[in-house]
Amino acid sequence: MNGPYPSQYGFGALRCAIDNYNGDNVEYIAYPLGARHVFCFAYYVTPPPTSGTIVVRKQLDAPPDVAEHRFQFEGNLSFNADGRFALTAAPGRPSAQTFYRAAVSAGGTPWRLHEIAEPGWALIDHSCVSQTGASRIGVPAESADAEIALAAGDTVTCTYRNGLEPAPSGLTVGKATRGTAGRTDFLIRGPGLQAEAPVTTTAVDVPVYERLPPLPPGATRSASRPWPSRVGTGSAAPCAATGGS
């Protein structure tokens, strides 16, 4: 757009037939059931002369073998209908999304951001830094909120850093499914022990955790096994824990 219309328009949103509402400029095209034609619409805006930039970063402090995870944010920063957007990050692979938004005048409504709590993860810290120092920023302690009175021409970067939530004493097994939801049976084996722990997911990409009764000391092995008649089960994936924790 900057070729035929130099410095006139900015990207607003891209919407396709099946949309994941990420609020970015990349979408996939798929055909809903029964549809023969699909459409994509790109929306462009004329940026206000006093606009600035807000960058939201997601960083994970976790072992490198931990899988990538999707974190939800809400507030007035996204123009999606529900005010939400998501960032998917993995250990060593942070994720970010950039928003070009109008500057906030004195007494105006600030841009607000809130990270929705994710089961199994804890917010270690979050901070927002102004590149020029002209924006007014509020990051309340003991919260997942941020308020940004954006200054014209400034770039504010907000970084949310998460880590794995410490597990309670004993053994906790969890399961997240992609594509569909259903039941997975975990087999727990140890000295003089063989137990079955069923975990049933009800939504895609939303983990469910099941806490087991106290286990006897010693090495414990856990594996999930597929059940042909059940949907959403995983393949065998043994893992080891020591001392029943």
Image (spheres, grey):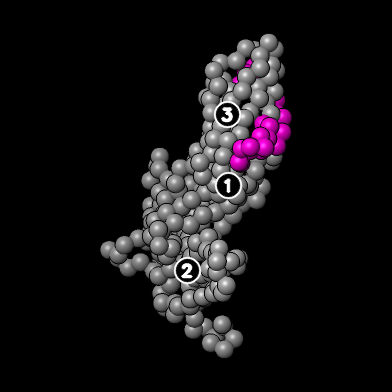
Q: Name the residue tied to disc 3.
A: 198
> Which dot marks residue 91?
none
Q: Please name the amino acid that badge 1 sits on.
A: Thr
Is-magenta flag for residue 228?
Answer: yes
The reply to whether residue 222 is visible in this rendering is yes
Residue range (magenta):
224-245
Q: Residue at x 57, y 83 (%)?
A: 2
Q: Earlier in the sequence, mark 2 or mark 1?
A: 2
Give whichever of 82, 186 is nearer the camera: 186
Where does residue 242 sit, x and y in percent of width and height?
Answer: 67, 20
Q: Name the residue tied to disc 1.
A: 180
**For residue 191, which quarter of the picture?**
top right
Give whichever of 23, 197 is nearer the camera: 197
Where does residue 151 sit, x and y in percent of width and height?
Answer: 41, 67
Q: Earlier in the sequence, mark 1 or mark 3?
A: 1
Where does residue 91 sit, x and y in percent of width and height?
Answer: 64, 45
